[in-house]
């Protein structure tokens, strides 16, 4: 057997030593890397557990990220609630299915105390459309008042505390450009049509941007007794509003040309589609109540409320005249039936 020289033995020893050193470095490095990864995984798991995982959201007996769940499975198959038993817009689970509530809480018959600082809007058909601003609530005690200083703007809101009204609910908030923020009132779906309308509503805009005659050719031809000549009351709930009665009388007279030939700019011919939907030209007392409840004056009628300067009422004054509301002067007055003024409608619901 061949013997290695001292030089060869030294070389072999050095080689073995280098291999051992290299192996030691490799092994040590891998161990360090594994420890770092393990520590990072632990840190991530711990962070997730601290910030995202809640025992109450994990099924009982299941462990995730070191968090053991406590959530018990809920059996909803014995639940009996129906959509009409749950407040409208709220959700619940019944017999394993998610249902959305439809129940609405009707408002009471307490007087709402309507004012410029306590505004209510009407969604008459509960269809999401704001139809107007409410200016009188018939559910309260009798209220007497006057708008203007010449004695022609008196009104009385009759007592209605013992009457049976339709049911309504508050369906949300609305912010109108002129009357500001307020609550929206709509009728409930289960309304009893035999019950009384409770609210008077004024449209938020005139019928258009133009002026119109009352009845151009009726000048000198109107016959008494004049409609709403002396009346200063808003009609008792359950009866036709004064303005609606006036409007129906005048449309019938205009359609038959009772007081003279029709003019294409007479308001009675222009509003008939709106009248079919229940709207009417307000009487002088209804206009007065509207002006008083919102404290409308000659300085704020346009800047605050966006109202036209002068509007027709449906009330007659003489064989030549009909009442008008002068917002710019802050009073009720009258004008010739061939004058051209703005027209805005009201209704009840």
Image (tube, rainbow, N blue to C red):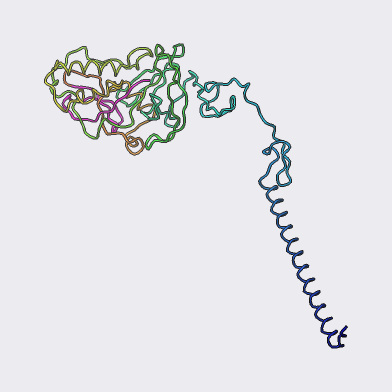
> Observer-nearest residue: 348 or 21?
21
Instruction: Determine the residue positioned at 75% across, 68% down.
Output: 29
The residue lying at 88 percent from left, 83 percent from top is 1
Residue 136 belongs to magenta span: no
| Residue 23 higher or lower than 338, as above or below | below
**Which quadrant of the figure has residue 60?**
top right
Residue most extreme to the left = 261
Along the horizontal axis of the image, is 223 left or right of 6?
A: left
Q: Residue furthest front?
A: 1
Give whichever of 134, 292 is nearer the camera: 134
For the point 19% across and 23% down, which residue is it? 269
Q: How many marks?
A: 0
Which of the two residues, 190 or 7, is positioned nearer the viewer here? 7
Residue 190 image-quadrant placement: top left
Where residue 278 sits in the image (x, y, percent)?
31, 20
Comparing 309 with 147, the one in front is 309
Q: Give the quarter of the figure containing the C terminus.
A: top left
Q: Position of residue 69 (x, y in %)?
A: 71, 39
Residue 208: which quarter of the image?
top left
The segment highlighted magenta reads 321-349
Image-based side of 119 in relation to 57, left or right: left
The picture places residue 148, in percent across and down from the top left corner, at 32, 27
**Residue 281: x %, y % from top left:** 27, 23
Residue 323 among those drawn in magenta: yes
Left or right of 196? Residue 24 is right
């Amino acid at each position: 057997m061949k013997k290695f020289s001292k030089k060869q033995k030294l070389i072999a020893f050095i080689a073995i030593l280098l291999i051992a050193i290299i192996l030691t470095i490799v092994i040590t490095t891998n161990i360090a890397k594994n420890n770092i990864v393990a520590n990072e995984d632990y840190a991530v798991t711990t962070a997730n557990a601290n910030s995202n995982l809640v025992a109450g959201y994990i099924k009982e007996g299941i462990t995730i990220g070191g968090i053991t769940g406590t959530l018990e499975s809920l059996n909803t198959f014995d639940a009996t609630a129906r959509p009409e038993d749950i407040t409208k817009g709220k959700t619940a689970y019944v017999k394993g299915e998610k249902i959305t509530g439809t129940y609405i809480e009707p408002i009471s018959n307490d007087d709402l105390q309507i004012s410029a600082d306590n505004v209510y809007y009407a969604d008459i058909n509960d269809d999401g459309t704001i139809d107007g601003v409410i200016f009188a609530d018939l559910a309260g005690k009798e209220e007497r008042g006057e708008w203007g200083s010449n004695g022609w703007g008196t009104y009385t809101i009759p007592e209605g505390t013992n009457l049976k009204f339709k049911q309504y609910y508050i369906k949300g908030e609305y912010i109108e450009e002129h009357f500001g923020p307020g609550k929206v009132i709509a009728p409930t779906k289960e309304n009893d049509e035999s019950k009384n309308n409770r609210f008077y509503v004024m449209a938020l805009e005139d019928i258009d941007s133009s002026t119109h005659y009352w009845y151009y050719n009726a000048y000198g031809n109107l016959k008494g007794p004049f409609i709403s000549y002396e009346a200063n009351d808003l009609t008792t709930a359950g009866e036709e509003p004064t303005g609606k009665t006036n409007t129906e009388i005048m449309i019938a007279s205009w359609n038959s040309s009772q007081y003279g030939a029709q003019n294409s700019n007479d308001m009675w011919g222009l509003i008939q589609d709106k009248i079919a939907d229940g709207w009417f030209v307000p009487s002088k007392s209804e206009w007065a109540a509207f002006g008083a409840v919102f404290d409308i004056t000659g300085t704020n009628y346009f800047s605050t409320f966006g109202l036209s300067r002068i509007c027709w009422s449906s009330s007659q004054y003489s064989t030549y005249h009909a009442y008008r509301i002068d917002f710019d002067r802050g009073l009720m007055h009258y004008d010739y039936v061939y004058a051209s003024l703005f027209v805005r409608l009201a209704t009840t619901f």
